[in-house]
């Protein structure tokens, strides 16, 4: 949640920043996407580092750095400073979601994994429910610097909490042995390093069709998600002629609905159906596809000029994306070989966030050229269709990828 409040602050402060520094729509698109450049590029290295050094150490360093990055944004004096601060934030938060996926794999048996994943994924949406009005009030009342200052303070508080509370299950002295046995017997992801070296694991997973089927599906999610995350307030201000405060109030509606669909359908419903004996692979894939089909409602936004109907279509689309989100983030711990969860999550999130970086820029230049958001929404819809096809026909069943085979040093034979 704190991670995403850091990300949305720029979109809320955008009208003031645009006026203060005389920024064009294209320049704002670049700023909106800058976070994703470094965030995407570092996903695979961050996943490999995570698999090597573990959740506890990487989590502590990452949270400390992103608090500093948030504070740096509040002190910038122009376009270059803002760009640099957003790039720094992308570096700091690069391990975040992969770290959450890996920790969830450690701490929860398979039958509880969907809801656990949905809770941390829904927090990204809930960040907009509380973060948008909180930051909007600060920006309107005190100026844009205070918006970034609040996110910096929240980040620092999260760092203190994570440092004090998080441990892996086998290292947590407060964990009852019976609970640990329940978690492990229920199919939790095994702790420990990969059976292959980091480069070997990366090379192996980059050639796996299942990993790429999941990744392409996640690209569809991330492109549309970042379009809404970065441009929704500006869309409401520019196209629907709302004030910053009114746009903030309207923005809460789809993000609040998204929080509910994330936890109830992308989380609880999956665990409920699997607990009743339904086929795990079919349940997860069906709900993932259902979410992406609902996300196609983004095309409906192109057919209205009524702000109420626009919010209805956006709410359906974001609700669908939020169903898909926790399902995709539960996948790395379900399909990765031992020690490879971070790397699978890194590949998925790297390629997804390349799309996430492209979405704000493409939207900015499309809006600048056409003076309309319609074509930008059509592009998002097309990419979602591609994602649906990838999940249906490329990814295959939800089951673990076999562990990589390695050469015996003594004989050169291939051994498991």
Image (cartoon, rainbow, N blue to C red):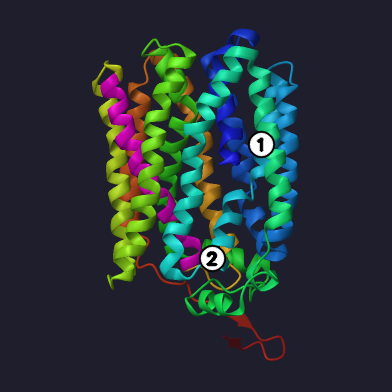
Disc with the residue nearer the chain's start (1 vs 2)? 2
Q: Quadrant of the N terminus?
A: top right
Where is mark 1, residue-wise?
A: 154
The location of residue 194, given as percent across then percent down, is 64, 72
Q: Quadrant of the C terminus?
A: bottom right
The residue lying at 57 percent from left, 55 percent from top is 100
Determine whether 121 is above or below 223 in the image: below
Q: What is the span of residues highlighted in magenta in the rendered image?
A: 308-334
* The disc label shown at residue 105, or none: 2
Q: Is any part of residue 44 visible from this angle?
A: yes
Callout 2: SS:
helix
The location of residue 389, given as percent across then percent down, is 30, 52
Left or right, 291 with respect to 42, comes to left
Q: Which quadrant holds residue 411?
A: bottom right
How many C-alpha atoms fall within 10 Å of the one at disc 2: few (<14), some, or many (≥20)? many
The location of residue 214, given as percent across then percent down, is 42, 57
Tell me the chief SS of the magenta region. helix
Circle 1/circle 2 CB separation < 8 Å: no
The residue lying at 40 percent from left, 57 percent from top is 213
Q: Check residue 320 for magenta coloring.
A: yes
Q: Which of the two marks, 1 or 2, is nearer to us in this view?
A: 1
Left or right, 310 with respect to 72, comes to left
């Amino acid at each position: 949640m704190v991670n995403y409040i850091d990300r949305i602050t720029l979109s809320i402060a955008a009208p003031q920043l645009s006026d203060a520094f005389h920024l064009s729509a294209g320049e704002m698109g670049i700023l909106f996407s800058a976070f994703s450049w470094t965030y995407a590029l570092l996903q695979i290295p961050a996943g490999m580092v995570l698999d090597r050094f573990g959740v506890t150490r990487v989590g502590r360093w990452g949270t400390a750095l992103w608090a500093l990055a948030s504070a740096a944004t509040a002190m910038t004096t122009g376009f270059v400073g803002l760009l640099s601060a957003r790039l720094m934030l992308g570096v700091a938060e690069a391990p975040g979601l992969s770290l959450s996926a890996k920790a969830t794999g450690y701490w929860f048996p398979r039958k509880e994994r969907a809801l656990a994943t949905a809770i941390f994924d829904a927090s990204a949406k809930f960040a907009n429910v509380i973060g948008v009005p909180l930051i909007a009030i600060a920006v309107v009342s005190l100026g844009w610097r205070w918006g970034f200052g609040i996110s910096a303070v929240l980040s620092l508080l999260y760092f203190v909490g994570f440092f004090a509370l998080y441990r892996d299950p086998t290292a947590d002295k407060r964990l009852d042995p019976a609970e640990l046995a329940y978690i492990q017997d229920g199919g939790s992801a095994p702790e420990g390093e990969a059976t292959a070296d980091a480069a070997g694991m990366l090379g192996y997973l980059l050639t796996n069709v299942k990993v790429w089927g999941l990744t392409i599906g996640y690209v569809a999610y991330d492109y549309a998600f970042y379009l809404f995350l970065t441009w929704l307030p500006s869309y409401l201000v520019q196209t629907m002629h709302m004030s910053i405060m009114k746009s903030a109030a309207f923005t809460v509606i789809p993000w609040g609905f998204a929080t509910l669909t994330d936890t109830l359908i992308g989380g609880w419903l999956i665990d409920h159906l699997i607990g009743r004996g339904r086929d795990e692979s079919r349940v997860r894939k069906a709900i993932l596809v259902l979410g992406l089909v609902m996300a196609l409602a983004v095309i409906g936004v192109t057919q209205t000029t009524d702000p109420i109907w626009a919010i209805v279509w956006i709410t359906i689309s974001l609700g669908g994306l939020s169903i898909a989100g926790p399902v995709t983030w539960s996948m790395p711990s379900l399909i990765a070989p031992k020690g490879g969860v971070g790397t699978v999550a890194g590949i998925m999130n790297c390629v997804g966030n390349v799309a996430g970086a492209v979405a704000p820029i493409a939207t900015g230049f499309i809006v600048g050229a056409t003076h309309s958001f319609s074509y930008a929404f059509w592009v998002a819809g097309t990419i979602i269709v591609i994602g649906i096809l990838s999940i249906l026909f490329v990814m295959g069943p939800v089951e673990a990828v076999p562990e990589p085979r390695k050469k015996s040093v003594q004989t050169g034979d291939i051994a498991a």
